[in-house]
């Protein structure tokens, strides 16, 4: 009967303006599904942030780091031409906001990497209540790919910073000038407190970025899962 005919398939052409991660994870309320739903939502957020961090590194950080110290192309330029006295320090002073941004960026990558490792380790542990019924045959490859992307970004930053000799030399000259400012802050129209605060920022950048150990700083972190204080007290 044509009147009772109904199409088994319908097509929705109106796309929603925004799809949230929780809209992508829909599980029936059966035993164990609540835990896996929470886990998948966390992993979706972490994978999205890892993608954003990777894109940010490519679009905002890699280029300026690679091009630091590059002379403009002109007919009078000689490859043997040395930078004028004070020019290296001036370049670092201009470049310093990006180094601060890079330092904050690396700290965030470290935090996301730790969170990813903890989530994956907890989900795939064979004694986990989630692992046995649901994830036994699924290795969560997207989570490991996100972790791989973050490690690739850190290795690339190490390679770029260490490979730019003008950047590392200019940084050494800049630190030398700051040492003079510590001894005679009034000459630089500053105070001892301001110079000390400035030095702490430079030390943070120097230790985390300029020694070629950005990647090592990540893998040397403590990846152990934090134990809840109340649970620890109950067990003791």
Image (tube, rainbow, N blue to C red):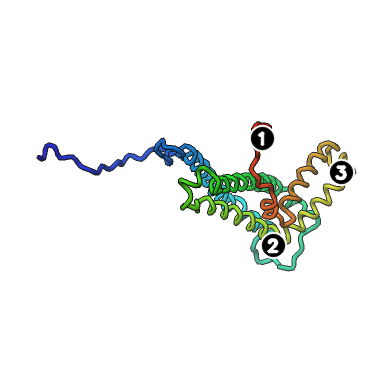
Can the viewer see residue 25?
Answer: yes
Label 1, secondary structure: give it: helix
Decide which of tag 1 and tag 3 comes sooner along the chain. Answer: 3
The foreground one among 130 and 180 is 130
Q: Position of residue 185 (x, y in %)?
A: 86, 40
Residue underneath mark 3? 182
Along the horizontal axis of the image, is 233 left or right of 50?
right
Q: Considering the image in quadrants, where does the N terminus appear?
A: top left
From mark 2 to mark 1, how far is it between C-alphas? 51 Å
Q: Quadrant of the C terminus?
A: top right
- Please tell me in which quadrant of the rendered image residue 196 appears: top right
Q: For residue 146, which numbered disc appears in the image?
A: none
Labels 3 and 2: the sequence-earlier one: 2
Mark 1 to mark 3 CA distance (whole Å):
52 Å
Rendered location of residue 197, percent (x, y): 79, 39
The x and y percentages for residue 38 are 50, 38
Mark 2 burial class by Cα count in 10 Å: few <14, some 14-19, many 20+:
some
Quadrant location of residue 194?
Answer: top right
- Would you say 52 lies left or right of 159 here? left
Label 3 CA crowd tier, 10 Å (few <14, some 14–19, many 20+) = some
Q: Which residue is mark 1?
A: 235
Helix, strand or loop at disc 3? helix
Q: Residues within 10 Å of mark 1 (few under 14, many from 20)?
A: few
Is the C-beta separation of discs 1 and 3 under 8 Å?
A: no
Frontmost of labels 1 and 3 is: 1
- Image: 201 above or below 159: above
Q: Nearer the viewer, mark 2 or mark 1?
A: 1
Between 99 and 145, the residue placed more toward the observer is 145
Q: Which residue carries the number 2 mark?
A: 163
| Residue in view at x 73 percent, y 54 percent | 210
Residues marked 2 and 1 touching at CB (< 8 Å): no
């Amino acid at each position: 009967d044509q009147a009772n005919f109904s199409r088994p398939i319908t097509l929705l052409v109106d796309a929603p303006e925004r799809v949230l991660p929780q809209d992508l994870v829909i599980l029936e309320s059966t035993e164990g599904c609540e835990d896996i739903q929470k886990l998948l939502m966390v992993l979706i957020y972490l994978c999205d942030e890892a993608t954003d961090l990777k894109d940010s590194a490519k679009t905002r950080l890699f280029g300026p780091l690679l091009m630091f110290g590059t002379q403009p192309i002109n007919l009078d330029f000689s490859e043997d031409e040395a930078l004028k006295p004070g020019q290296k320090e001036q370049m670092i002073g201009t470049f310093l906001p990006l180094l601060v941004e890079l330092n904050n960026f690396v700290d965030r990558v470290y935090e996301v990497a730790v969170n990813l490792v903890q989530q994956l380790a907890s989900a795939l542990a064979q004694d986990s209540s989630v692992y046995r019924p649901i994830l036994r045959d699924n290795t969560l490859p997207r989570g490991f790919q996100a972790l791989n992307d973050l490690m690739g970004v850190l290795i690339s930053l190490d390679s770029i910073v260490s490979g730019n000799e003008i950047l590392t030399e200019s940084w050494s000259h800049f630190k030398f000038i700051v040492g003079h400012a510590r001894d005679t802050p009034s000459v630089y129209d500053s105070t001892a407190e301001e110079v000390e605060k400035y030095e702490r920022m430079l030390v943070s950048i120097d230790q985390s970025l300029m020694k070629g150990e950005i990647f090592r700083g990540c893998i040397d972190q403590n990846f152990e899962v934090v134990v809840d204080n109340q649970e620890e007290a109950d067990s003791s």
